[in-house]
Amino acid sequence: MGSGNDGKRAVVTGAARGIGKAVARRLRAEGIHVLAVDIDENGLEDLARQGCRTRSADLADQAQREALSREAEGFDYLVNSAGMLRVKPILEVTVEEWRSIQTVNAEAVFFLCQGIGPRLRPGGAIVNLSSSSAKLATSTDVAAYAASKTTILSITRSFAYALADRPVRVNAICPGIVDTEMQDNFLAGVARKRGITAAELDAQRKKAVPLGRGASADECAGLIQFLLSDEAAYMTGQAVNFTGGTVNW
């Protein structure tokens, strides 16, 4: 990105922590005006001090999504990073748990792409956060989450076609192990069910990664920054793996 970013604006959801926060910080450092969105208003305070505009919003709520879409008129970028994960054995997931996960992880992404995508300036871009779990079923304790992340891949492809003539590009990334608070919650929940420590489970999972480690949130933000940039101007409808070699299809 670098030069030429004066006046460019981005909406980043799920910006209070993890990958969303890393993206908001990186884009702001590049001179892009960032609207950082999260349900956790207190979690946005650090970004506000760094020059981001912040908005507390529950993206499971239709009216709040629509208000955010109107506010994004004339923006350039949208990063759909907001998401939720619950650890629950696949045979015990309730209808209410299923719906709550799908509403935040899939429905919100669909309707923000629908509401904001046509409002982005020509040459704009969207990046949706999927997951390696959209392609692998290595832990059925997060099956509802994995299903929502698989849906995001279809949403991404459909909006890539729908917005191509604007042109607005739409891509997704599929991170694997990333050192975030969500990852910590996953490790704690699954380890407890397996009768081992979170550290033991973490070591087991990273041993299966060809590169032998997890990624940082900032590394993910670097990939997202590239997909938003003009350097990726011929990429749309793609699901880019970011898994240290664990997923290569």
Image: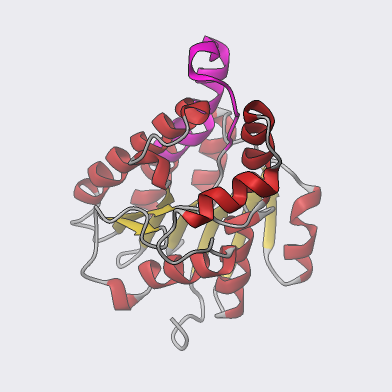
- Start and end of the magenta stretch? 84-110
Image quadrant containing the N terminus: bottom left
User: Which one is in front, 76 or 73?
Assistant: 76
At 54% from the left and 74% from the top, the residue drawn is 32
Please, is residue 96 above or below residue 5 in the view?
above
Q: Main secondary structure of the magenta part?
A: helix
At 46% from the left and 89% from the top, the residue drawn is 3
User: Which one is in front, 246 or 65?
Assistant: 246
At 29% from the left and 59% from the top, the residue drawn is 168
How does the figure colour the protein chain or chains?
secondary structure
Horizontally, is 23 left or right of 185 in the view? left
User: Which one is in front, 76 or 248?
Assistant: 248
Horizontally, is 65 left or right of 52 in the view? left
- Figure quadrant of residue 31: bottom right
Can residue 130 be seen here? The reply is no
Where is residue 53 drawn, in percent x and y? Answer: 68, 61
User: Which one is in front, 98 or 213?
Assistant: 213
At 55% from the left and 72% from the top, the residue drawn is 27
Q: Which residue extends farthest bottom?
A: 3
Where is residue 105 drawn, in percent x and y? Answer: 49, 35
- Figure quadrant of residue 147: top left
